[in-house]
Each structure stands twice: as C-alpha cells, then as structure tokens.
C-alpha cells in the first residue's frame, strides 16, 4: 500500500477514536459539549455555520496568533509543516507519467494582460478548466475509466456562499463577486451545490507568489486566513452532513493560485472539539484553529507557464494535483489502481523514453540540424553499417552536370542538374529542364520505395518528396496558389539507366533506382539559412520575409492547411529579373491536412504546442515564424538537448520579452507581431492574417518611400 494511503488510513483511525486527540492542546474542549442532546447539537451547529460567513472578521480574530507564530519561529524556518513529502510527490509524479490531462482554456498572461475584466474572466475559467482536467485525469487513471466522473466544477458566489456555473455568473456581470472555484460531488437535487459535497476549493488571488513573505516561504496572513476560513467551513459542513463519506473527512484542502503560481493549504482536525457558541462564532472558530487544527502549507510554485499551459510535471502543479487526489479519495474511496501500480510502469516508460531519446539524438546534434549517427554498436558493426548506408544513399545522389530523367504517366522529361543544395538534413538540387535550359527548378529525389524498413533518413526523404508531392497536389487541386507558395512543376518516377524490366502489372524491376519518386517545384532561391550565414539577411528582408510567409500561411489556412515545419531552411528568397526579391515558404512535406497529421519536431523552431502536444494550434506556424525571424535577426538560441530545456528557455525568453526586444531592434511592427503571437499561442482563437498583412505592407511601403528619398539626396 502506498505511503499516501497509509497516512490517510492513519487519519481515519485518529477520528474514529472519538476522544483520542491528535493535537496536544485539546484539554478542556470536550467538557462543554457533553450536556447538549444530539438533535439540538446538530441544529446548533447548523446555526453556527449559518453565522460563520465573514472571512474578514474570522481573519481578524487570528491576527495576534499569527503574529506570535511568526515571531516564535526562526526567521529562516517555515511556520507550518508542508502537506506532502517530496518522496511522495516524486512517486506520484511517476504514477502520473502515463496520465493525460486535457487542458482547453489557456491561463492568460498576467504580466502583459491589462487587469481587464475579460482577462480576469478568462483566468477564472482557466482555473476551472485546470480543476476539471485534474479531477477528470485522476478519476480516469486511478478510479475508473468506464464510469463517468461523478464530480463537477463550479464557482463560489461571495454574497450567499452558493455555487454557480462560472460562465453564467460572468455573463451576468457577477465576476467581481466570485470568490473561489470548487470541485463538487455531482448532486442533481442541489444545482447550487452543497457545502458537504465540496471536495476542494481553489482561491484565485493575484500575486500569490508576491504575497509570500520575505523571510518565510508561506503566504501572507490575509490569504492564509481566507484559506483557513473556507477549510473550516468545509470541515463543519462535512460534520453536519448526512451522507457517509467513505474516507477521512477530517482534513480539507484549499488551493491558492494566481495566473502563474499555486500552493496547497491543508487543515486537519476534529471539529467536534469546537465550542459551537452561536453568539460567538468567530472567537470559537479562531480558538479551534489555534488549539485543534493541524495546518500544513506547501511552498508556492509555478503551475502555468508563460504560454498559459499547465506544466503538469512541475512541482507546483504536482502539489495541487496531489491534493486533489486526496480529495477524490475522501469522496470516492481508495482508487482501483494504487499510486504504486501506476508508478511501477515508470521504469518501463523511462526505458522507452531513453530509446526515443537516442533516436532523437540522431536528429538534433550540434547546430540543431539532422545528421545520421550510429549508437551503441560495436565498432566493427558500425563500420559495416556505415558503409552500406553510404553506398545506398550515394547510389541515388546526382552529380552536377548529370541529366536525370523523369517519367510521368504521359511523358518523359530530362533535367540537367546544376547545383546540389541541402535543406539541413538532405540533399536536393537546382536543375533545368533539358528543353528549357534557362529555367531553374528545385528537384527532389526520394528514396527507393521497396525499402520496407526505411531508416530515419528515408523517413525524412519520404516527407520531403512523397508527402510533399501529395500536399502540393492537394493545394493545386484546391486552387491554392500565390506568389509566396511553391508550385508543383512535375512529379513522377526516375528513369534509371539500363533496361527497365518492371512487370506490366506495375511495381519495380531489380534496378536499385527503379520506382524512385521525383518532385520538381518552382521557384528557386537562396534559403534564409544561407542568407543568415552569409550575412545577407537585414531589416528589409526581415519585414518582407514575415509578410510573405504570413501571406503564404494565410492562403494555405483558407483551406485548413498548416505548414508545421517553418525553419530557415524552408524559406527561400527569390530574386528574378527586375522585380523586388520576395520570399517563398517551401518544404510543405510536414503540412497538417487533417487532425491526425503530426508536425515536424524541431527544438528551435517548432511551436511550443507542437513540442508539448505534437499538434499545432492556430498561431503555431506564426510562432515558428517568430522564432525563425528571431534567429535570422541574430537572436541566439542556447545549446539544448531536450524539449524540457527548450520549453524552459522559451518560457524565460517570452516572460522577459527577450524575443520581442530582439525583433524590436529590427522593427516595431515585428515586435508588435511577436507580442500578438505571444498572446495567441495555445488559444483556440484564429490568427487574424489580414490585419498583420496590412500592417507589414504599410511598413514595407514606408521603407521603400524612405529609400527613394535617400536615393534622391
Ligand atoms: Zn526498372
């Protein structure tokens, strides 16, 4: 049995021995209750609870006690115990590894968001969403996957201490009167929620972490007083309740959160020891807290990152989730699967992750480019494998000056190879049609289709050639075209040297090139990666690049297509004739056409949502574009080797506005765009392309105008 359950069972044994007190200062408390009959006692308690409604008065009654506590405790030592041991949190963390928490509403960014009602309302909804995701995730993982979750989330209305749906309360302008969000046992007969059905409460109080005192790691009296007040109300309600709670209900949890941080307050004790003097409720309540309550307060830690996503594995979120786990257990009994059961899979998952990581390492090394590497094999084997891999890929490599023939169902066409380029991981070519030598096109050569177990390299080749052919074909069919999008010029199979003996029924012959797919696109140009390394990427380029890529994204998204792989190797600058240079977004092999498609994973340029969820949100491509421009404008990326590290870097960079500042050095419109993207990331709201295309166009015109004046001087 887990330590958690043991501790909890100990809790039960303590309440079940009616007189045996867990606290030291309980002498004398039992005597006053003895003369009252149980019926009138219950009425008396109800009256007491009915009168215990003013949190401020309650807190004021505790002020002296708080003061003495803080004075007594050594400066550096916390006043209260922590509710959870680190070792239990760690075990819980292992158990949660396979659990998915579905977050729908992003926590708005407190630093930039004005203290507007809408930001506040969203914060409320984000807390509720977080609570809902937490109980649902825990319920399905530990208790039951088949039975529906018996809990719901609602907000507490200050004026009458009843529960309402937050959406309704906010819609009717009552946002200011909401004081907490609670998880409740569903009870159709009581739509406004009953206090004894309340599992836990979360208090959203701005600046929780700033309320943490200078010397002690505990929230201030004001916030703590509130938490104690609500916890006490929960405990009294449960004592009065007619329902039988399966497990210990002598402890209550209150969560303290702001838009980034959170902590847990746990209050434990036997409320029967309270002197229920209805004419003196606040004094009695304060006395009970001082003499009979065991209070534990966790450190305040980060829950939501800069982008408003909950970091489920972080200690801040873990503490809060762990508290919720306890609360569910109080109402639903011991879980079907113990923490131990679920944590036992950790070793196995760790192994899988290590393997994935090894694979991942072949993709990310040094400059963040993809390169092939051998792992953990003996030297002899490495050599043999190396050789074979080389042979295989070089056999398909074209040389400058050679002519490659392509066949479609209708025609054959030759391409003269002029240049070999690299997209960072794989070679591709600049080629001219034999019949039109003045024309330049990009030519991509795929991998041999008969390779049943393609190596990592070949998977990338598949995206580059076959998948990209599919995407460009679909775009063509949907009539998506534009100056800033690549065009499918030709696609088909390579015509290999020698006689092709492929069966008439289709398929390939024995020749190692037979059936190899080819893709030809236009236009051609220098990649942003090359421009940056040669110092050709300046202010003009940054603004134009952003405009042109946005225009391409806007066109594609009109048919629901997203790019998913924006990086310096996938944007080219086209210089042709007299027209101004412009940028084209290429490399559409990883494009998202439907829900199940997964974007490319690139530590530096993938959107945060892609790194975390393997999916794109509406602003994801724009987010990648921002990272690319940041890089192209000289912004530095740290040397990182993990998604966690990269996410951490982003969080810090966005929160300190380092990315915006860097882009701001280039142009104010780029900086504003980065701010816009920051505010949109992770939300379901659509990108407003038109506004930004207009703003960029205006800024390009202004610059052109400035140039003409310069030239005339
Ligand atoms: Zn053949």
Image (cartoon, grey):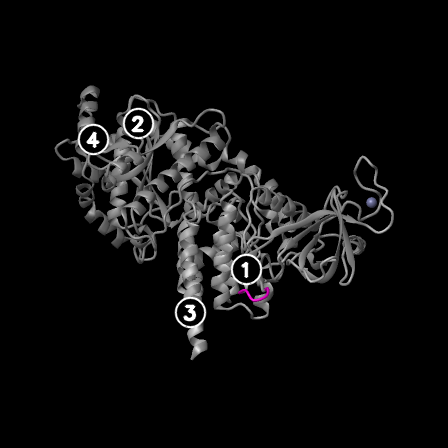
**Label 4 – label 2 distance at C-alpha:** 22 Å
Q: 135 and 558: which one is in front?
A: 558
**Label 3 – label 1 distance at C-alpha:** 20 Å
Q: 684 and 45: which one is in front?
A: 684
Q: 1 and 501: which one is in front?
A: 501
- Identify the residue shown where x is 58% and y is 45%: 475
Q: Position of residue 311 (x, y in %)?
A: 45, 47
The residue labelled by disc 2 is 18
Quarter holding ligand 1: top right
State left or right for residue 393 relative to residue 693: right
The residue labelled by disc 3 is 705
Does label 3 or label 4 sit earlier along the sequence?
Answer: 4
Q: Are the residues at dot 4 and dot 2 in contact (C-beta closer than 8 Å)?
A: no
**Label 3 – label 4 distance at C-alpha:** 73 Å
Q: Position of residue 208 (x, y in %)?
A: 31, 50
Q: Position of residue 569 (x, y in %)?
A: 60, 59
Does label 3 or label 1 sit earlier along the sequence?
Answer: 1
Does label 4 or label 1 sit earlier along the sequence?
Answer: 4
* Mark 3 Cα-neighbour bin, 10 Å: few <14, some 14–19, many ≥20: few
* Mark 4 Cα-neighbour bin, 10 Å: few <14, some 14–19, many ≥20: some
Please determine whether, in this image, residue 265 is positioned above or below residue 397: above
């Amino acid at each position: 049995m887990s330590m958690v359950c043991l501790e909890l069972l100990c809790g039960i044994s303590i309440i079940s021995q009616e007189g045996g007190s867990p606290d030291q200062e309980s002498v004398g408390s039992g005597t006053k209750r003895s003369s009252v009959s149980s019926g009138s006692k219950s009425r008396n308690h109800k009256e007491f609870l009915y009168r215990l409604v003013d949190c401020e008065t309650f807190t004021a009654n505790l002020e002296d006690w708080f003061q003495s506590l803080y004075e007594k405790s050594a400066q550096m030592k916390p006043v209260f115990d922590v509710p959870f041991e680190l070792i239990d949190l760690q075990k819980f963390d292992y158990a949660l590894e396979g659990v998915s928490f579905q977050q729908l509403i992003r926590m708005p960014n407190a630093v930039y968001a004005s203290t507007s009602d809408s930001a506040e309302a969203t914060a409320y909804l984000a807390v509720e969403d977080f609570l809902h995701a937490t109980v649902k995730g825990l319920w399905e993982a530990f208790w039951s996957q088949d039975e529906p979750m018996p809990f719901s989330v609602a907000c507490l209305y200050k004026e009458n201490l009843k529960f309402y749906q937050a959406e309704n309360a906010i819609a009717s302008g009552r946002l200011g009167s909401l004081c907490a969000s609670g998880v409740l046992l569903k009870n159709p007969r009581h739509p406004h929620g009953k206090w004894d059905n309340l599992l836990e409460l979360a208090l959203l109080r701005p600046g929780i972490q700033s309320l943490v005192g200078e010397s002690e790691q505990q929230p201030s009296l004001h916030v703590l007083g509130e938490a104690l007040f609500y916890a006490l109300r929960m405990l009294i309600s449960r004592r009065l309740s007619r329902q039988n709670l399966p497990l210990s209900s002598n402890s209550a949890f209150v969560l303290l959160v702001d838009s980034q941080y959170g902590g847990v307050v746990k209050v434990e004790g036997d409320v029967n020891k309270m002197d229920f003097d209805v004419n003196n409720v606040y004094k009695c309540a304060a006395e009970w807290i001082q003499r009979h309550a065991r209070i534990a307060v966790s450190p305040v830690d980060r829950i939501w990152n800069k982008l408003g996503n909950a970091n489920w594995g972080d200690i801040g979120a873990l503490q809060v989730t762990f508290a919720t786990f306890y609360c569910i257990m109080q109402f639903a009994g011991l879980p079907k699967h113990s923490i131990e059961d679920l944590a036992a899979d950790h070793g196995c998952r760790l192994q899988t992750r290590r393997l994935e990581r090894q694979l991942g390492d072949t993709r990310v090394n040094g400059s963040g480019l993809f390169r092939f590497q051998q792992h953990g094999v003996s030297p002899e084997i490495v050599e043999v494998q190396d050789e074979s891999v080389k042979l295989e890929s070089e056999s398909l490599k074209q040389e400058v000056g050679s002519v490659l023939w392509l066949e479609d169902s209708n025609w054959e066409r030759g391409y003269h190879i002029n240049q070999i380029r690299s997209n960072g991981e794989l070679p591709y070519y600049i080629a001219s049609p034999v019949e039109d030598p003045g024309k330049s096109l990009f030519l991509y050569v795929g991998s041999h289709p008969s390779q049943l177990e393609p190596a990592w390299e070949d998977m990338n080749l598949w995206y580059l050639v076959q998948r990209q052919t599919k995407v460009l074909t679909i775009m063509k069919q949907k009539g998506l075209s534009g100056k800033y999008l690549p065009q499918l010029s030709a696609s088909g199979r390579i015509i290999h040297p020698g006689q092709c003996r492929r069966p008439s029924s289709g398929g390939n012959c024995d020749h190692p090139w037979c059936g190899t797919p080819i893709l030809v696109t236009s236009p051609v140009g220098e990649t942003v990666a090359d421009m940056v390394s040669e110092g050709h990427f300046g202010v003009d380029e940054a603004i134009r690049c952003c405009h042109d890529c946005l225009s391409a994204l806007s066109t594609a998204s009109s048919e629901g297509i997203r790019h998913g792989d924006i990086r310096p190797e996938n944007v080219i600058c086209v210089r042709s004739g007299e027209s101004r240079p412009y940028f084209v977004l290429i490399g559409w092999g990883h494009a998202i056409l439907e829900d199940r498609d997964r974007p490319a994973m690139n530590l530096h340029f993938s959107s945060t949502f892609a790194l975390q969820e393997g999916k794109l949100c509406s602003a994801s491509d724009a987010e990648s574009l921002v990272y690319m421009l940041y890089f192209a404008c000289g912004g530095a990326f740290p040397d990182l080797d993990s998604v966690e590290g990269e996410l951490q870097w982003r969080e810090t960079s966005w929160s300190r506005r380092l990315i915006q500042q860097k882009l701001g050095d280039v142009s104010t419109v780029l900086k504003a765009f980065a701010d816009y993207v920051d505010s949109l990331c992770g939300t379901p709201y659509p990108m407003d392309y038109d506004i930004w295309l207009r703003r960029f166009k205006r800024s390009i015109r202004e610059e052109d105008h400035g140039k003409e004046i310069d030239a005339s001087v």
